[in-house]
Amino acid sequence: MTADNNTTFKIDASGIYYRDLNEKLRELIANGTHNIELINICGQRYIGTDLDKPVNIDIYGTPGNDMGAFMNGPVITVYGNAQDGCGNTMNEGKIIIHGHAGDITGLSARGGKIFIKEGVGYRAGIHMKEYKEKKPVLVIGGTAQDFAGEYMAGGIMVLLGLNLREGEKYPAKFIGTGMHGGVIYLRGGVEDYQLGKEVGIAELDEKDREILNQLVAEFCAYFSYGIETIMNRNFIKLYPRYLRPYGRLYAY
Amino acid sequence: MKTLLTSKFAVIRDPEKCIQCQVCVNQCSFNANYFDAEENEVKSRNENCVDCQRCVVFCPTMAITITNTPLEYRYHRNWTASVIDDINKQAETGGVLLTGMGTDKDYPVYWDHLLLNASQVTNPSIDPLREPMELVTYLGSKPQKLEIDERTLELRTKMPPQVKLNVPVMFSAMSYGAVSLNVQKSLAKAATEIGTMWNTGEGGLHSSLKKYGSNTIVQVASGRFGVHSEYLNSGRMVEIKIGQGAKPGIGGHLPGEKVSSEVSLTRMIPEGSDAISPAPHHDIYSIEDLLQLIHALKEATNYTKPISVKIAAVHNAAAIASGIVRGGADMVVIDGFRGATGAAPKIIRDNVGIPIELALASVDSRLREEGIRNKASIVISGGIRNSGDVIKAIALGADAVYIGTSALIALGCHVCQQCHTGKCAWGICTSDLKLTKRINPDVGSQRLINLLRGWSLEIKDILGGLGVNSIESLRGNRLHLRGVGLSDSELEILGVRPAGR
């Protein structure tokens, strides 16, 4: 079986066990399939793991936990919601969710981009890290729950809060607790008590704006928003106040 | 602030023998030996000496002796020298006491209360010098039963991935950053030559070590440093590290000073930044979550590699191990409270966890009772000192053991417990390039190969004496053990009879 770049291979996943589904995906991609459409996905885990090629996978339904865990290349678009562990320890590739995602979205991601139209659960972007040109990106259209950006060691997180009404606060507390790298751009504002004690607040500079504009433009392209409606509010930048938060902890 | 701490050791230099060559000055990384140019004489600062014995070994005229400092605190059962020193250290710094190596506290060593059997008259012992003796061990999940095609005699059961060990002794996880690259090279080279495994620890895999991949266990810990699909697929086995015997329940901080450009390359974090491993894996809050990560890793490696889960030996180790096995792990590693570390809070190293012998016995018993012992191999670690400990561990139910400190001692470690300072004079637990070159991987690997050759010969001798010709016959065979000086409940947990019965 061979496939050219333009044909889309369609799989009806109803009743297919995750192991069989992922086995099928491996097989298809090994045979050169570039575009895959999965319909009736319902809870199958680990979609996109161990697929080291920049293939396109469109998912209709609700994929299970750890979608794109350890992922290294594919572009996954979900027309629905994602569950926990989406983009866990991801290395390369893209995840676009036309809905919301569960807890620990983007945990320990090292590269790649994740765009979520709506909100995410607890500890989103926890311990994302960066190295040289590898810089993970997590853009959240809605809001995040507590401990967003905890232990963050690198990468960029954008919180847009598009679902917040005028004057309504972000629900998250302990944002950026233990943060020692990376940056969070947050649309609107937060109260001091919502931030981890390692986090500082600053105005965006020229370079921040450039990065933010690009990411918001990409977000708008996926989810059909107007850039102006997002950029019409002020953004703040959350940054780690210390690069060595635990430097003075020990007696030698 | 003036320190109230006093010298622990005294460097005594025999003036008759000393030739003022300054080798001791150059070898000491703690600045305990120095050359006084005014008096044209080599001298010592006793307060800096950690008793690592580096200068003693390298003095060409054997002029140096190190002793415990003659000044001793007045005896007190409760307020010992180490208690007084620790209080002073904290009064002066306000910090968490940090230490290295495994606990030096006087807890019971159960191996020393277990004795092996030998054949006399009623069954013959075997002479391993002239008869075949099998030490080969396969790690990995074993099926409940095997189906064989009656016509072709071929195996119909699809075997889960297995890892073959020629000797049931592996090198435990020591990350690049905690130990030097030359140490990892020595371990990797020796493991490859012997036919056993070494373990990357949580620090990624240096590109120069990829060629040892089929003898490498790659670790995935809570910091996920250097973890990507190529890393996962470059080893023979993947190990999820939940905990470590020296510091159960807590994470780790590799201080920025130790994250050199080379270390940053394998950890994939910027040079000089702290490498923080959170206390839990934040994708594991339950056995169900662990099951999820185990299977994520199986998916990521296409079911070609056994997945191991390492925990510290803690009170409920047996129930936890049962959960781990039911979660799909192919191997459970239990690290006892004597297990060592590059750095840990002293209060945790010395007070948290339980002895590995008791944890092993209870885990093996529990998995047997539940009928799932075949589903995973059991590997233990934490203070294994010699082949006697290895063979007793196997008789108690282990499939294999990991050694860390023993391997480092073979490379030169003198157990001075200064691993956390990064100044290791033996060039082991440091990233200082002046010091790391003190380990030559060719010499180091040969010393490790020699050590395991010696242990293998001894294990074969003991097996022969027991009248068995394969390590498999001893595994979990606790009838070959007897306890001495143990209470009834200790004997019951260990599942061994008292000596004489």
Image (spheres, coloured by chain):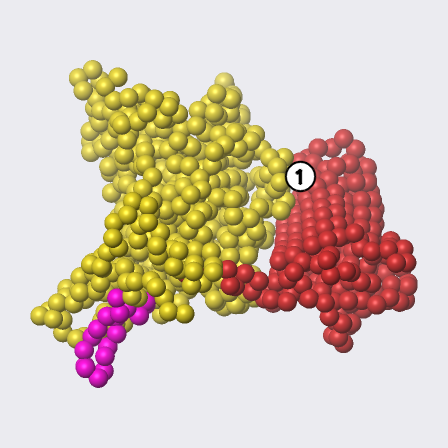
Q: Residue furthest left?
A: B16
Can residue A36 be seen here? The reply is no
**Residue visible at 12% across and 67% down?**
B14
Residue A30 located left or right of residue B28: right
Residue B440's place in the image compared with B122, above or below, is below
Q: Position of residue A147 (x, y in %)?
A: 69, 52
Q: Quadrant of the C terminus of chain B?
A: top left
Q: Which chain wears red?
A: A
Residue B4 lies in quadrant:
bottom left
The location of residue B141, given as percent across then percent down, is: 50, 31
> What is the count of numbered marks?
1
Instruction: Say which amino acid is labelled 1.
Output: Glu
Name the chain letter of the residue that bears numbered label 1: A
* Residue underneath mark 1: A23
Question: In the image, residue B450 lies at what x, y percent?
Answer: 26, 48
Question: Closer to the camera, A158 or B203?
Answer: A158
Horizontal side, residue B91 vs residue B455: left or right:
right
User: What is the magenta range?
Assistant: B27-46
Q: Residue at x 59, y 38 (%)?
A: B290
B360 vs B215, nearest the viewer: B360
Picture layout, residue B266 above or below residue A3: below
| Chain that is coloured yellow in the picture | B
> Residue A140's image quarter?
bottom right
The residue lying toward the viewer, choosing from B252 and A173, is A173
